Image (tube, grey):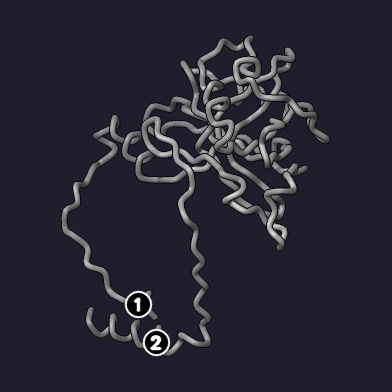
Amino acid sequence: MGCYSALVIPDLLICHDLLTMINLQYKLMISAIIPRPIAFVSSISTAGVENLGLFSWFNMIHSNPPLVSVTISTGAGKDKDTSANIQETKEFTVNIISVPFVDNANACSIDAPHDVSEWPISGLTKAPSVHVKPPRVKESAFSMECELFQATDLVHPESGAKTGTLILGRVKYIHVRKDILTERGGVDPDKLQPITRLGDILYATLGGGFRIPRLPWAENAEKVLELNKAVAEATQ
C-alpha cells in the first residue's frame, strides 16, 4: 500500500507559455519527454533511391491491428525523403537500433540530398523483406515490415503552415532474432540493448528494469473508497 503515501513536492516551478515562448517548445519537450524509442526507417523513393533515417517521435499505438506511429517534421518547407517515400510507395520497414551499431545508425542522420542513399555511409547490411520492397537492417535484432495505414499532415493552428506528417504504419511482418527472446516469447531488453533518445543530441541505453504488479480492485476497494471520501470531505 506504499503507493498511497503522500509525496513532498518542492514549490519551485517555472511556468512557460509556449504560445509566447516559441523557441522553448522543442528544447523543453524533447529534454523532458524521455526516454524516447527510435525508429530506424528504411524506405525507397519512386525513382528507386533507398533511404535510411532515424526518428525519435515513434511508438507502438495499437495491437489490433498492430500499428506504429512515426512523426516526421518537414525540412525547408517540404516533406523529408522518408515521409515522401512512404506516402508515395505506401511501405517501409522500422528497425530497432541496438548498442553494437549505434554509430552506424547515427551516420544516417546526415543531411544527404534526395537522390543520395544513406545505406553506403552506414556500413550496414541490407536484408530482404517478405511483404514490402524496402529492405530491413540485417544487424537489427528486431525489424518490422509496415504498410502505410494513414498519413496526417500536421498544420500549425496559427500560421497554417504544414510542419510535419504523422505516419501510421500497419505492421505486416516481424523479424526477431531468436537469441533475444525470453522463455515466454517476449523480447529481453537486456539482450536487445535498444538505444533511446534524450534531449539535445543525447542518446542513452536502458538501466535496470523492475516489475510492479497492478493493484487488484477487490483487495484495495475499501482503502480507495476511504481515500476518496476523505478528499471529498476535505474539499467541502
Number of numbered discs: 2
Relative to 213, residue 176 above or below: above
Q: Position of residue 148 (x, y in %)?
A: 70, 35
Up the image or down, 135 lies above or below 120; here it is: below
Read off the residue under disc 2: 223
Q: Do the numbered discs 2 and 1 sit on residues whose CB atoms are within 8 Å?
A: yes
For the residue labelled by badge 2, is the local secondary structure a helix, a strand or a loop? helix
Along the horizontal axis of the image, is 85 left or right of 132? left
Residue 146 is drawn in which quadrant? Answer: top right
| Mark nearer the viewer, 2 or 1 | 1
State the residue in front, 229 or 114.
114
- Residue at position x 42%, y 90% from top? 222
Residue 4, numbered label: 1
Say whether disc 2 or disc 1 marks the residue closer to the N-terminus.
1
For the point 31% across and 76% down, the residue is 5
> Tag 1: residue type?
Tyr
- Badge 2 crowding class, 10 Å Cα cut-off, few under 14, some 14 to 19, many 20 or more, is few
Residue at image position (55%, 29%) is: 54
The image shows residue 152 at horizontal and vertical percentages of: 58, 35
Name the residue type under label 2: Lys
SS for dot 1? helix
